[in-house]
Image (cartoon, rainbow, N blue to C red):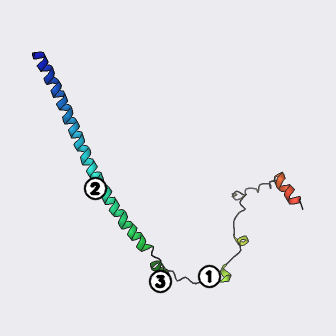
């Protein structure tokens, strides 16, 4: 009978220790959850404030007023417009070359392109 009592008391103490450990872990998780929920609430408030500020900063009337005040722009006249051929850029199939590097030999057109060029 005493053995049964000792075994039961031992099992009861193990279960009690396990419950205390689980309870403390749950309390830690609840504390962390509350902190995370508070952080989420703060972040949502910050996002709302930033969206309102972004709307204010991108207001077209405000941007127009700032451009007129600080940029002093004038309309484009026809003398400022150039054709695409006047732009200084390399052909799209040419790689940039270093100074003094010889120009590569031109590549022959593929046969289907060459036949289209000679066709009427």
Mark 1 residue element: loop
- Give the residue at x 77% y 54%: 104
Q: Earlier in the sequence, mark 1 or mark 3?
A: 3
Instruction: Estimate how packed mark 1 is, as few (under 14), some (14 to 19) or many (20 or more) residues with alpha carbons within 10 Å.
Output: few
State how far apart marks 2 and 3 are (Cα): 43 Å
Residue 28 sits in which quadrant?
top left
Question: Is the residue marked by circle 2 packed among few (<14), some (14-19), or many (20+) residues within 10 Å?
Answer: few
Q: Which residue is at the far left?
A: 2
Q: Which mark is residue 69?
A: 3
Q: Is residue 9 above or below residue 39?
A: above
Could you say which disc has been placed on residue 38 in the image?
A: 2
Q: Please name the residue shown 20% across and 34% down the image.
A: 19
Mark 2 vs 3: CB contact within 8 A = no
State the residue position of label 1. Answer: 76
Helix, strand or loop for disc 3? helix
- The image position of residue 99, as x and y in percent, is 70, 59
Pick the quarter of the image with the N terminus. Answer: top left
Q: Which label's residue is closer to the chain start, 2 or 3?
A: 2
Question: Is residue 66 found left or right of 28 in the rendered image?
Answer: right
Quadrant of the image occupied by residue 48: bottom left
Q: Quadrant of the C terminus?
A: bottom right
């Amino acid at each position: 009978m005493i053995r049964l009592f000792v075994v039961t008391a031992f099992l009861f103490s193990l279960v009690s220790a396990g419950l205390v450990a689980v309870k403390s872990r749950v309390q830690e998780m609840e504390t962390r959850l509350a902190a995370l929920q508070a952080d989420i609430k703060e972040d949502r408030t910050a996002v709302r404030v930033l969206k309102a500020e972004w709307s204010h900063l991108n207001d077209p009337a405000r941007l127009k007023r700032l451009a007129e005040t600080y940029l002093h722009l004038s309309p484009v006249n026809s003398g400022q417009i150039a054709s695409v051929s006047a732009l200084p850029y390399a052909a799209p199939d040419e790689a940039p070359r270093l100074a003094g590097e010889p120009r590569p030999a031109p590549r022959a057109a593929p046969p289907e392109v060459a036949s289209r060029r000679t066709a009427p």
